[in-house]
Image: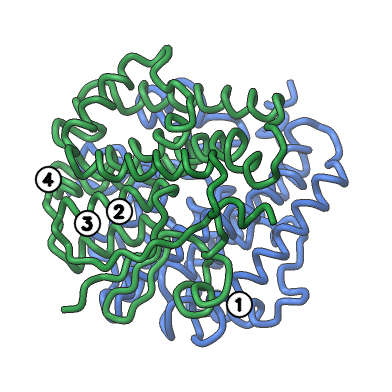
Chain colours: A blue, B green
Amino acid sequence: MQPVKFYFDFINQSSRALYILMEASKIPFEAIPISTLKGEHLTGEFRDKVSPFKCLPVINDDNLSLSESVAIFRHLNREKIVPEHWYPRRNYGRSRVDEFLEWQQRNVSNACGNYFQQKWLLPLLDKTPPEDKNINAATHRLNQVLKDFESLFLNKTKFVIGDTISYADLIAICEIDQPKFIGFDPFNHHPKLGKWYDEVREALGPYYKKVAEEFDNKVKRAEKKIPEVMYLQQ
Amino acid sequence: MQPVKFYFDFINQSSRALYILMEASKIPFEAIPISTLKGEHLTGEFRDKVSPFKCLPVINDDNLSLSESVAIFRHLNREKIVPEHWYPRRNYGRSRVDEFLEWQQRNVSNACGNYFQQKWLLPLLDKTPPEDKNINAATHRLNQVLKDFESLFLNKTKFVIGDTISYADLIAICEIDQPKFIGFDPFNHHPKLGKWYDEVREALGPYYKKVAEEFDNKVKRAEKKIPEVMYLQQ
């Protein structure tokens, strides 16, 4: 069987979560980096031949092109061998992971992504400083969402749906790293979140470490205006 | 086995889609209507005993309380007998339904929901006429999204993922009914959409007809300021 073609960008949270999942699950894949800062996902070959959705991540598996990270996650669970704990059948684990994935998109993902855009991405692309009003609104919403995450999901068990790590934890840590890696402290006022974050990072071990370092490097390189970003400023 | 407890409001698009799915699949369920216009999902017994998420729809099945309509859809597919065509295994049908469900949430659902709020719900609750600026922005976005829906999904096949109706079509028609039932014409400039809409309505038959009538009645009753809405205006 051909390895899965995986189009991704480490600056994108869902790309990192799926990269870690595939490495940790030993799913053979061909890693094809796409630079969203250069706009490679919007043009030419990618749009015409890889995905009309113009979003990352994308896989191509057995001639099926598939976008949307949650759909990719479920596809891998059906078609490949993914260790049970990521999406457990016992005690309605799959239903509860599914519930979290939908909830987190409208809440954690939305708030973390908006903060990242307002504080870092838009100022970088537009070459203008961020607007205080937008940053304040994004910060307020982010703190509210992190509080909801703590109170709804981190009360009773070590991880989101139980005492074993699942894909719910993996996607959540990658989402929260968006604001964290550009200087936001997510643990201020959220002690349970800090404890959970450390547990998740430890459980993911070297798979997380490598991908987080790549993300950190991308952020720092972009801030130093390396050619990748200069391209946008022509 | 106990019937599934189903908490819903016909004014909510995902509630209608799941209601139709369960009726068409002959899944035994206890229908428990909750009035979101009265705010019943935000307070008291619902928040404390049914769902801390304060959102509809919700099910309770075998002591599992589950929110998020996409998670409920998948739960029913795992735990009950749902006819194959709604979520087909063949030709990676499940992956393509999953991809559509995620895409549509950020696009069709978001644009239809926003139009419904700006044009109908907020003016009703706030007792102030809608603002032209907001309506124009919502209309522009909605037309753009309907155009994307046509060009990405209604080009080659009768229904969204093939020649048989799936849950992708069911959720899409319910989303598009939000603006349609308050007076927006979704088919203007979108002829493929009109053809698809008629095919879906015909395939769903009486299950759709009954639920659409209930929705229409709710909209008309609210507009006539029956007690349900008067409650908010005290």
Instruction: Tell me the distance, in whole angstroms, between the alpha carbons under discs 1 and 2.
Output: 28 Å
* Labels 2 and 3 share a subunit: yes
Q: Position of residue A198 (x, y in %)?
A: 60, 79
**At numbered mark 4, what does the secondary structure look like: helix, strand or loop?**
helix
> Earlier along the polypeptide chain: callout 4 or callout 2?
2
Q: Position of residue A186 (x, y in %)?
A: 71, 68
Pointer 4: residues within 10 angstroms few (<14), some, or many (20+)? Answer: few
> Label 4 belongs to which residue?
B90
Circle 2: residue type? Leu
| Residue tagged 3 | B22
Residue A56 visible in the shown view = no
Q: Residue at position x 45%, y 68% from top?
A: A168
| Residue tagged 2 | B18
Residue B125, percent from left and from top: 65, 47
Please report, as a chain letter, where disc 4 is located. B
Viewed as shown, does residue A187 lie left or right of B218?
right
Q: Nearer the viewer, mark 3 or mark 4?
A: 3
Give the letter of the chain under mark 1: A
Q: For the residues tagged 4 and 2, is the chain the same?
A: yes
Q: Please name the amino acid that badge 4 sits on.
A: Arg
Q: CA distance from mark 3 to mark 4?
A: 22 Å
B91, above or below A197, in the image = above
Instruction: Name the residue type under label 1.
Output: Ser
Alpha-carbon span between mark 2 and mark 3: 6 Å
How would you rate the neighbour count of disc 2 (Cα within 10 Å): few for under 14, some for 14-19, many for 20 or more? many
Are both tags, 3 and 4, on one chain?
A: yes
Residue in the image at 42% along x and 82% along y: A162
**Whether label 2 touches label 3, CB < 8 Å:** yes
Q: Is residue B174 visible?
A: yes
Between disc 3 and disc 4, whose residue precedes? 3
